[in-house]
Image (cartoon, rainbow, N blue to C red):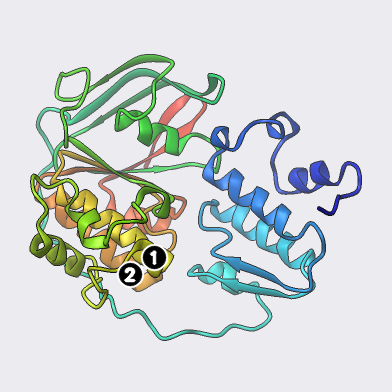
Amino acid sequence: RRRLPRGEVGRRLTALGIPPGRWWRRPYAWSGGMLQRATLAAATAHDPPLVLADEPTSALDADLAVSAVRLLRARSRALLLVTHDPTVAAQCDRRVDLTPAVLAPLPASGTKTVGGQPVVELSGVTLVAGWRRVLARGVELAVRPGEIVGVVGPSGTGKTTLLHALAGLRPIGAGTVRYEGRPSPPPGYVMPVFQDAAAGLDPRWPIWRTVAEPLMAPDRVAASDLLHRVGLSTVDPQARPHQLSGGQQQRVAIARALAARPALLVADEPVARLDPAAAAGVYALLAEAAAAGMAVVIASHDTARLARTAHRLVRLTPEGLRPIP
């Protein structure tokens, strides 16, 4: 119940790039990156002897990540930081490595020609958030079977909102979204992998049941096979989500999405909480799914890694999507 000096909250948010016009909005109207920055401000507010930061920059673009860690260091008397990002780790005074991950990169099953009728098509779409705050206008995008499209852009530009619009999870302000010519997707047509994997897992269910959820009938064998494919063969299928690490929870969410064999998979920062070896394995899985004909849209701040996997990259701006050569 300690209070901060008058104006201190605003000063801290401004230092992290959150403008005054956003301070009074509820969390659901903020992007994942903005929420992460607000958490950094809150963690250091009362000058604690020790700050524990678990992947504090996973939802931030590269420039914001560097500045956020620099500010976190300056405002922490002592800081213990866990990260998979070598750039972030390089800013620490001392680094220690835990046991390397056991998940090895999986080979993709070859390439597949991208073509045919779009699985999903956005035409003249206006993306909105909160109280119909406009994020982008004139968004045009067509994703075809077997294609991986990477979406990049600074934190807060609306990448998550775009994925939700593609999945039919959020209304748009204007324009149309079509699924092979239909105004709405049939059940199982689109599967999402949310940025906050833990929030999308039922805490009461064993993870095998979560993975099997999209199937016509609960199938523990099929679920165990999918868990093995995403590098979780050593995890007890009866484990509950709270018994897993953040990275393991993310892989459970990816396994569930793949279980449905959807026409379209949308993934929001699917490897932000994974180490490089695990991230390479997940991207290889997504490439394998695309090679089999699935359309995949990935939003990420890691442009370099995304460029190695996606067939094309687009940048989200207030004026719509712009191709990246």
Where residue 126 appears, as percent x and y from the top left, is: 43, 19
Front of the two marks 2 and 1: 1
Residue 305 got which mark? none
Where residue 43 appears, as percent x and y from the top left, is: 71, 59
Residue 278 got which mark? 2
Neighbours of disc 2 within 10 Å: few (<14), some (14-19), many (20+):
many
| Kind of residue indicated by mark 2 | Ala
Neighbours of disc 1 within 10 Å: few (<14), some (14-19), many (20+):
some
Residue depicted at x 26% and y 61%: 207
214, 109: nearer the viewer: 214
Residue depicted at x 60% and y 44%: 34
Residue depicted at x 80% and y 41%: 10
The residue to which callout 1 is attached is: 247
| Kind of residue indicated by mark 1 | Gly
92, 185: nearer the viewer: 185
Secondary structure, mark 2, is helix
Vertical order, 102 against 168 (above or below):
below
Where residue 15 appears, as percent x and y from the top left, is: 76, 48
Vertical order, 90 against 94 (above or below):
above
Residue located farthest toward the front when viewing the structure as drawn: 204
Secondary structure, mark 1, is helix
Tell me whether circle 2 and circle 1 mark residues in contact (CB < 8 Å).
yes
Vertical order, 85 against 196 (above or below):
below
- Residue 231: name its quadrant: bottom left
